Image: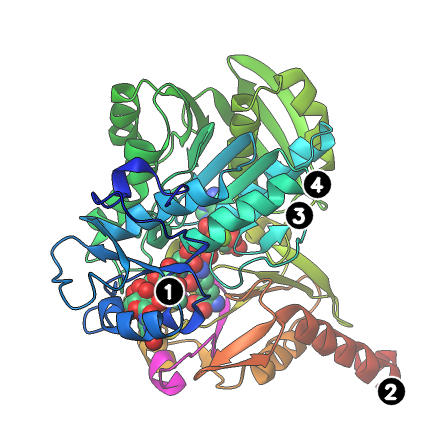
Amino acid sequence: MLSRVPEEFRPSSSDDNREITALSLDSRKIETGSLFAALPSTVEGGPDGFDFIPQALASGASAVLVPSNRDISGFETKVTVLKSNNPRQALSLLAAAFSQKQPETLVAITGTNGKTSIATFTRQIWEALGHKAASLGTLGIYPPIPNAPAALTTPDSIGLFNSLKNITDLGYDHLALEASSHGLDQYRLDGLRLKAAAFSNLSQDHLDYHPDMASYLDAKLRLFHDLLPVGATAVLNADMPEYAQITKICAKRNHHVISYGHNPSDLQVIKQSPTTEGQDLVLSLFGETHKLTLPLTGSFQASNIMAAVGLTLASGAKLKEILPILPFLKGVPGRAEKIGKTAKGGTVYVDFAHTPDAVETIIQALRPHTSGKLSIIVGCGGDRDPGKRPLMGGIADKLADQAYITDDNPRTEDPATIRAQAMAAAPNAIEIDDRRKAIFKAVSDLHDGDLLIIAGKGHESGQIVGNKILPFDDRIIAKEAIDHTLETRNIGGPDRA
Ligand SMILES: CC(=O)N[C@H]1[C@@H](OP(=O)(O)OP(=O)(O)OC[C@H]2O[C@@H](n3ccc(=O)[nH]c3=O)[C@H](O)[C@@H]2O)O[C@H](CO)[C@@H](O)[C@@H]1O[C@H](C)C(=O)N[C@@H](C)C(=O)N[C@H](CCC(=O)O)C(=O)O
Ligand SMILES: Nc1ncnc2c1ncn2[C@@H]1O[C@H](COP(=O)(O)OP(=O)(O)OP(=O)(O)O)[C@@H](O)[C@H]1O
Ligand SMILES: N[C@H](CCC[C@H](N)C(=O)O)C(=O)O
Ligand SMILES: [Mg+2]
């Protein structure tokens, strides 16, 4: 019988004694005895999973999940048929039922920027408190585990719930995961048993997928509307223009709200003073003043840390236990990560800013650490929101002393066209097609006290060109470029440095 299938999805005929052994949403990856979820594409004109049912059956599928409105007369007698008005959501609930196990303390973070940072800091705080904790998102699963799904920030529901089981089986009972807007919109996370959820901020991204900013926000709000259980904790950025709107949803769901930010809030950043190694903070935490030294560069990291404090409080930790941990937090790979100094004394950072707001944020965050000029390398991803390109180019050009426009991940688009769209709003920028050349040029242009931000790819270890991923790591190339300045100095003598 379909023992692991929740009652609501079982077919009405009860003489079905086939067991479903696994789930799949891809007809090319069917194992014998599995259920094939025949999902319509999320993109207009994309392939329809329904058309691949014959292929799935030929590969040994013993059941299919189909949209309720589809005509199944062709294969009804050959196979168990499950129907749903919302097959993507049904698949997630099935995946949750199949995997069963989830870490006891599970929190999710949504927002345009900051999800990875907040998930990482949350994990670090839990670890320091002695919990076996993990994070899941753009950086994959950390600590790494076998058979982790690759590539997406929020994996597909089958991969996600399978990972939650594996994480739990390995003894991790605390997990912070990233909830992307695609993931929420495609119901990849339905079925999570969340203790808390955070919303970091909203700014333009992904308008290639969401029709407009309102739909983008709606996708993110699903986390609070639909997924965070009644009575659980919502950690909300009080600086967001949408803050009042989100708190209304939370009030309806009887969520306990912990607010954070620079505006009056439970976890309020009152003052930030940049230091050579990070920043000094004055905080008002539930009305009490605290001073804190953070070893992290970038004013935005203070907000991300307050969000992580909110999430760890929501999971039962006490403020007095959390505060002593904060001065020892480590930076997040590829986020405002300092790479080194050139022979002439310029400093190089790598950052994952790939939205207009993040480009602005990182320039403003690192400006106080520059005694000379600040330059930035910016590129824009192909097959992603083209509306971001002139905005990113324009902000870089306006706010930095020198912007360099180069390639990011062109994917299947023409890189020259992408660069031209960014250059259109960046009259003073220098265009260099090859990213490696751009890094070498920008690094060699640095003088004493200057600072360079290499933005867009952060931790990424490859460059996606067409359908290939070519090895490329900004941090490695930046080191090579820095070393080149040091070698050139050694060869030419100090007077040429
Ligand atoms: C645009 C998008 O989000 N697409 C996601 C969506 O794919 P889809 O269902 O639309 O796929 P499709 O190719 O149109 O095919 C339709 C169906 O037919 C099936 N099919 C297709 C061909 C075949 O031979 N056999 C077969 O069964 C497919 O498996 C699929 O179920 O559902 C799939 C399963 O969950 C995802 O893997 C896929 O992510 C693609 C690969 C992707 O690149 N997504 C990116 C944009 C994404 O999700 N990014 C977010 C944002 C990160 C951030 O915050 O910045 C993320 O969470 O990573
Ligand atoms: N709180 C914040 N406010 C504004 N910008 C931020 C904030 N936190 C991080 N950033 C910027 O966004 C970049 C990406 O940060 P992070 O990886 O934490 O975000 P993310 O939401 O996980 O991104 P993605 O959507 O790609 O998963 C950082 O490198 C930084 O430039
Ligand atoms: N999670 C982000 C990553 C973008 C990284 C950037 N390097 C790009 O390729 O645009 C996205 O899928 O939009
Ligand atoms: Mg992320």
- Check the picture and name the quadrant holding the C terminus: bottom right
Residue stretch rendered in magenta on the structure: 397-418
Q: Give left or right: position of 439 versus 433.
A: right
How far apart in space, not on screen, are marks 3 and 1 (Cα)?
A: 46 Å
* Residue 351 in view (yes/no): yes
Q: Mark 4 points at which residue?
A: 295
Where residue 278 appears, as percent x and y from the top left, is 68, 43
Mark found first going from the N terminus, 4 or 2: 4
Q: Name the residue under label 3.
A: 331
Q: Is residue 439 above or below residue 271?
A: below
**The magenta stretch spans residue 296:** no
Under mark 4, the amino acid is Pro
Ligand 3 neighbours mark 2 (CB distance < 8 Å): no
Mark found first going from the N terminus, 3 or 1: 1
**How many residues crowd around disc 1 within 10 Å: few (fewer than 14), some, or many (20 or more)?**
many
Under mark 3, the amino acid is Gly
Mark closer to the observer (1, 4):
1
Q: For this rendering, which residue is in front, 27 or 221?
A: 27
Mark found first going from the N terminus, 3 or 2: 3
Contact (Cβ within 8 Å) of mark 1 with mark 4: no
Residue 61 image label? 1
Contact (Cβ within 8 Å) of mark 3 with mark 4: yes
Q: Is residue 340 above or below residue 485?
A: above
Where residue 299 appears, as percent x and y from the top left, is 55, 42
Q: Mark 2 points at which residue?
A: 491
Under mark 2, the amino acid is Ile
Where residue 233 appears, as percent x and y from the top left, is 43, 23
Which element is circle 1 on? loop
